[in-house]
Image (cartoon, rainbow, N blue to C red):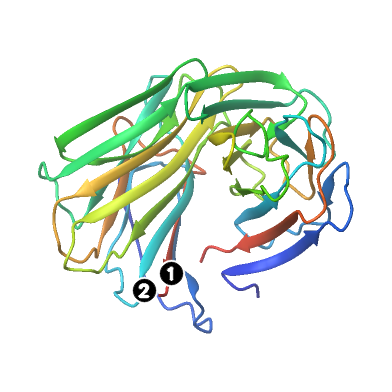
Amino acid sequence: MIGNIVAAITDGGEAATDFESIATVTVGAGGAANVEFSSIPSTYQHLQIRGIVRSSAASASQNTLLRLNTDTAANYSTHYLTGNGTTAASGAEANSTYIYAGALPAANTASGRFEAFVIDILDYKDTNKYTTVRTLAGWDANGTGLVALWSGSWRNTAAVNAIRLLPNTGNFIEYSSIALYGIKG
Amino acid sequence: MPKTYEPIATTTLTSAQNDITFTSINGTFTDILVVAFMKLSNNANSSVVFQVNGDTGSNYSVTRLQGDGTTTESSRSSNIANGNFSGNSLRVADSAGNFSPILFNMMNYANTSTNKTFLARGNNASAGVGAAVSLWRSTAAITSLKIFPIVGTIDTGTIVTLYGIKAA
């Protein structure tokens, strides 16, 4: 059964530094419908998520989606600039139920190819502004692929305390790995 | 035990060089972030590329996205002998004083289960901005990184630093 993975936020015992690892999830053989970081502490200024992922969907690729604080309503929007190896394109999606945070190869793409992404969430605990998410991501499969920049907005001033990442179709497969970091200001 | 974000090595050029190479990269970290401030010494336009583990075979591929202030474009190269370090196939700065900041991510570089994916962002004040994703079709852990321009040499004053990022 494909389940969700909720990462435990623990104190690793390491002396506090300005850039700290908060939690990491590496998907096992059973796959994962999504990866969620919950109970994110408010002790940082910014968050960064770094990872490699791949989807089990029966297609060449899918999108990586992001939601905050378990909000599944249409409170998100995204702008993007993409390059598919042939064409540079720009687009947007308003009033959606997620932020686009990448594109990942899926089952119909040669094995071993994973999307890499770096997601920044600046001022995540600031209750005076909406949350903006910035992503650099891409995957290449030696003849196909995509590299892109995404900017997403969550129209809510609440402090971010949970982040969920998921492929829009399929599950994250084994060896997908996502790590959450906190950056102190 | 490594810190979460730790400088591993820094190279500052005091004379022009054909390449910058980091060896004996240990597998202690999760990702490697290379932060470069780079200029080429010859008066020519060139991408800066990379090879890992001494692999000079056609085991790399790249997808690029770039804009030069006039045009946006995306391109691809398959079965080539290097990946893209500078984030685009435009020029890394070659005019006096005009260094290009580059961020280059080697993601999960030490795992032996997946092929290796690299993300690059490059910026050149006179030439443009770009991003590139590269693939190295090998599951080997990365232990060395060679950075070099397609044309010319890397100029005096270039600084390249490797940082290790360790996930919990």
B43 in relation to B125, above or below: above
Res. A100 mark: none
Q: Which residue is drawn at 40% across and 39% down?
A: A172
Res. A183 mark: 1
Res. A44 mark: 2
A64 in relation to A90, above or below: below
Coordinates of residue B47 in the picture (x, y in percent)? 70, 32
As helix, strand or loop, the secondary structure at mark 2 comes to: loop
| Residue A1 seen in the current view | no
- Quarter of the figure that contains the N terminus of chain B: bottom right
Looking at the image, residue A181 sits to the left or right of residue B128; the answer is left
Looking at the image, residue A33 sits to the left or right of residue B62; the answer is left
| Residue B168 seen in the current view | yes
Q: Which amino acid does label 2 sit on?
A: Tyr
Q: What residue type is labelled 1?
A: Ile
Q: Residue at x 53, y 63 (%)?
A: B167
The answer to the question of whether label 2 and label 1 lie on touching residues, with beta carbons closer than 8 A, is: yes
